[in-house]
Image: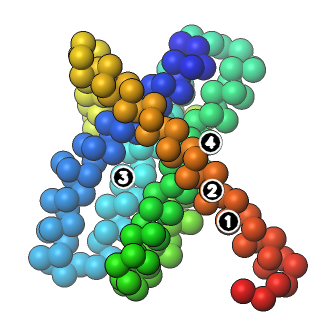
Amino acid sequence: MNILQFIFYLGIINIVFGFLWKWVFVLPSALLLTLLKMDKGIYIVKAFGSYLLVSLTAMLTLSALQYNPNILSIILFSLIGVFILFMGYASNYREAQEQAVREYNYELMRSYQYEGIFMVGAVVLYVVTLFVPIIAVNLLTIWLFNIINWAYNLKVIGWLIGIGGTLFLLSIIWQGIFVSAIFIGSLVGKIKGEPK
């Protein structure tokens, strides 16, 4: 597996996992948590989703490293994986923030105050998982990885998923860079002591 194939497959993981996660798990969980009036339960759902996405990304990275067992590949594949994860979280944060502002939903804005923690937590978990792969391996992640692989290998649907994954990945990277620039600018402003 070369770097372009790795990046391509990361896009596929993000789009297929995002679809499965949203419609198969998050929607029913959100309905159940709403019925049970458990407002903080959504953070548990987000943490579990983060664990699964990080695990799939780490499993793909480790799989790619088996084909390229040299120091340069270890560094390059690991950095690409962490970059895509970080950009994905930054992109999701921006989209959620824009939606909250559009809808004047202050409760939603407050619920996204912990997104930075999820972002940092995902990056740390990814790095740890590369050193301790057993963290990522369980029946659910193996099943998800196999489903993604199966969908990718379907003739017409696989190509559509591949194209969608590539476009999705480009969108994530673009939005992630935008949010990162805002975040860095905000940090620099705080360090310099500039007023908000």
Whichever of callouts 3 and 1 sits on the residue coming sooner in the sequence is 3
Please rate how many residues cluster around mark 4, counting C-alpha atoms within 10 Å: few if below 14, some from 14 to 19, many from 20.
some
What residue did someone put label 4 on?
Answer: 83
| Amino acid tagged 2 | Phe
| Amino acid tagged 3 | Gly
Query: Callout 1: helix, strand or loop?
Result: helix
Q: In percent of the image, x 84 and y 76: which residue is there?
A: 191
Q: CA distance from mark 1 to mark 4?
A: 17 Å
| Nearer to us: label 3 or label 1 | 1
What residue did someone put label 3 on?
Answer: 49
In this view, which residue lies farthest toward the bottom? 195
| Nearer to us: label 3 or label 4 | 4
Asked if the residue under mark 2 is in contact with the one under mark 3, i.e. CB atoms within 8 Å, the reply is no
Asked if the residue under mark 1 is in contact with the one under mark 2, i.e. CB atoms within 8 Å, the reply is yes
Whichever of callouts 1 and 4 sits on the residue coming sooner in the sequence is 4
What residue did someone put label 1 on?
Answer: 182
| Nearer to us: label 4 or label 2 | 2
Asked if the residue under mark 4 is in contact with the one under mark 3, i.e. CB atoms within 8 Å, the reply is no
